[in-house]
């Protein structure tokens, strides 16, 4: 988990570990969005294209795929990390998630970076703290190393 902050212009300075990761990507474009209108995600474009294909081909409940894809398009923007290691978040995304000029918490998950407001970070921290030992034991029985 890494702390960061969006400045008054909607730019977030990326921690060095993520900056190195983004610089190493062949394609430098990123997609910054929210799928659930609560947390933000930063996707390398290659990973985002996989998600777009998933939405297009999800047949179990196409309405759900369309709704999530709508959220992503409504709040998302293509961007690139600038020379100072900053990523710009769209004004709509910042306002919707209430992260304008606010601290956020970052972590890598499933090929993208999750961006949590303080409020959502604390809520997830509380939820993850309710039964951590039982959760770990269950996952270890299922194959977690």
Image (tube, rainbow, N blue to C red):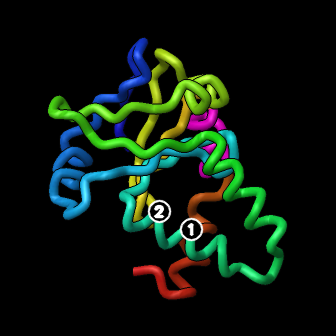
Residue 30: x percent and y percent? 37, 50
Residue 13: x percent and y percent? 29, 29
Instruction: Name the main secondary structure of what is drawn in magenta.
Output: helix
Q: Secondary structure at mark 1?
A: helix
> At 69% across and 41% down in the image, what residue appears?
37
Which disc is residue 48 wearing? 2
Question: Closest to the observer: 14 or 130?
Answer: 14
On-image quarter of the N terminus: top left
> At 80% across and 82% down in the image, what residue appears?
60
- Tell me the crowding category of disc 2: few under 14, some 14 to 19, or many 20 or more residues within 10 angstroms, Cα based: some
- Residue contact between numbered discs 2 and 1, judged by CB atoms under 8 Å: yes
Residue 68: x percent and y percent? 71, 57
Question: Closest to the observer: 94 or 130?
Answer: 94
Task: Examine the rendered structure and indicate whether residue 31 appears above or below residue 10.
Answer: below
Provide the residue span drawn in magenta: 120-129
> At 62% across and 44% down in the image, what residue appears?
124
Q: Secondary structure at mark 2?
A: helix
Q: Quadrant of residue 125?
A: top right
On-image quarter of the C terminus: bottom left
- Give the residue pinned by disc 1: 52
């Amino acid at each position: 988990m890494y702390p960061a902050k969006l400045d008054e212009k909607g730019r977030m300075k990326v921690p060095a570990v993520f900056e190195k990761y983004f610089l190493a990507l062949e394609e430098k474009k990123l997609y910054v969005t929210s799928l659930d209108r609560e947390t933000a995600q930063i996707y390398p474009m290659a990973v985002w294209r996989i998600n777009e294909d998933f939405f297009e081909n999800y047949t179990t409940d196409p309405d759900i795929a369309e709704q999530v894809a709508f959220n992503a398009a409504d709040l998302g923007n293509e961007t690139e990390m600038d020379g100072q290691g900053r990523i710009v978040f769209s004004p709509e995304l910042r306002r919707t998630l209430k992260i304008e000029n606010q601290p956020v918490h970052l972590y890598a998950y499933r090929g993208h970076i999750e961006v949590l407001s303080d409020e959502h970070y604390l809520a997830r921290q509380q939820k993850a703290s309710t039964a951590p030992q039982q959760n770990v034991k269950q996952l270890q029985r299922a194959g977690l190393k």
